[in-house]
Amino acid sequence: MASFFIPLTGLQSDSTALNTIANDLANMNTTAFKSQKVNFSDLFYQQIGSAGSGDPIQVGAGVQVSSIETAFAQGSINTTGNSTDVALNGSGFFVLSNGGGQEYTRAGNFSLDSNGNLVTQNGLGVMGYPATDGVVNTNAPLTAISVPVGQVEQPQATSTFNMLANLNAGAESGTSFPAQVTVYDSLGISHVATVTYTQTGTNTWSYSAALPAADFTSGTSTPVTGTMSFDSSGNLTSVTPTGGSATAVGTAAGDTSTITVGFSGLADGAANMSMKWNLLGSSGTPVISQVSAASAVSSTSQNGYASGQYQSFTIASDGTVSATFSNGQQKAVGQLALANVANVQGLQMLGDGDYAATLASGTPSIGISGTAGRGTLQDGALEESNVNISAEFSDLIIAQRAFEANSKAVTTFDTVTQETINMIH
């Protein structure tokens, strides 16, 4: 009978609302949890007649749950200091691999498995773009993000070095000034290269680059030598390698910007060293000058390093995962991918904070953070639940009152029915 059916639809719908509120409150401390709200709509109507004016007289059939909307509003960001925690600030989802397809989540409380793979709390692999020799390729297919835990980074032999220096224009002829720079061979073993500058004439200095004699199997070092010339303003204008011809220093055609320095027969068994001594800075001007001031080296740099043991990793705001090694080097090992969908309400909720794309959500658009409307990342932090406890308690009272009202309608009709039966008897 309608008088029973109608309040029963109300009880069922209100029960769904109460369950939804209870689920929100239960997950108020769940990482990146998104609260939900139940929407109702009335059922079909039956026309039982018409008024004198012709207006239809209609009786409703109750209520139904028309939708349950998920509030994808941003949750608060809480700093944890844990390098495996990542907070997503803005729209988007982390991309996960479930073995046979992709899932999506906003919960960035990741961890590392025994193989160094970045995984979620339920063991799904976190996906991103691969890196080769420290360079991320965002055009490559997605792959699992793997951190080189326990691995050793191979050494890199020095191939370039430079020296920001000044040679004293007032020095007497024959005055020598030694300058040193540490370089590395192919085995990652360091050597101290000494460049000795000697004043040989007006605006002219000779140079001699050598390693210690003990670094060679023969016990002797063959230095790389030549001459540097300066103009009246103290600018380096040309270099003349021993046995070669003078070449202008600069960036024009035919000019040179480097001096080739090589050493062979290293005692440690490393490959022959071949290095470029950079004479120009990033602005294209010489880094060696000659003015009336004490000869001095302001700084040196080179691109080689020894081998290093993995120590830690960090995740940048653009999702780049960089490993740090004991030799002080940092190396990109991948970049987290983020996904967006046209209709977030169309996502299927799978539990554990995971979602699956559906026809209603649309095909996910995958890229890197900070592009195409995707949010940015914060390492060592987590997004909290966006449950508003005050609003939930208010909705809870409303749902409770509605449930009680529908319960009263059932008991009232039960009383009326009993009275009707008693009239018959």
Image: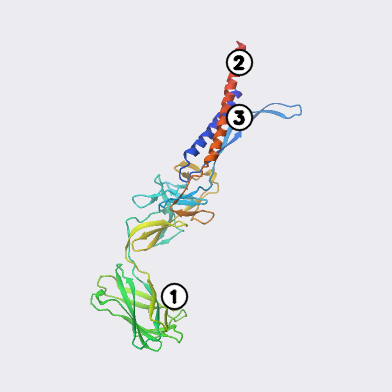
How busy is the neighbourhood of tag 3: few (under 14 within 10 Å), some, or many (20 plus)? some
How busy is the neighbourhood of tag 2: few (under 14 within 10 Å), some, or many (20 plus)? few
Secondary structure beneath disc 1? loop
Of labels 2 and 3, the one closer to you: 2
Mark sitting earlier along the chain (2/1)? 1
Of all residues, the one furthest to the front in this rendering is 294
Which residue is nearer to you in this view: 201 or 302?
201
Of all residues, the one furthest to the left in this rendering is 218
Secondary structure beneath disc 3? loop
Q: Which amino acid, mark 1? A: Gly
Mark sitting earlier along the chain (2/3)? 3
Mark sitting earlier along the chain (1/3)? 3
Which residue is nearer to you in this view: 331 or 87?
87
Real-space CA distance between mark 2 and mark 3, rounded to the nearest whole angstrom:
24 Å
Q: Which amino acid, mark 3? A: Gly
Real-space CA distance between mark 1 and mark 3, rounded to the nearest whole angstrom:
80 Å
Q: Which mark is residue 62?
A: 3
Secondary structure beneath disc 2? helix
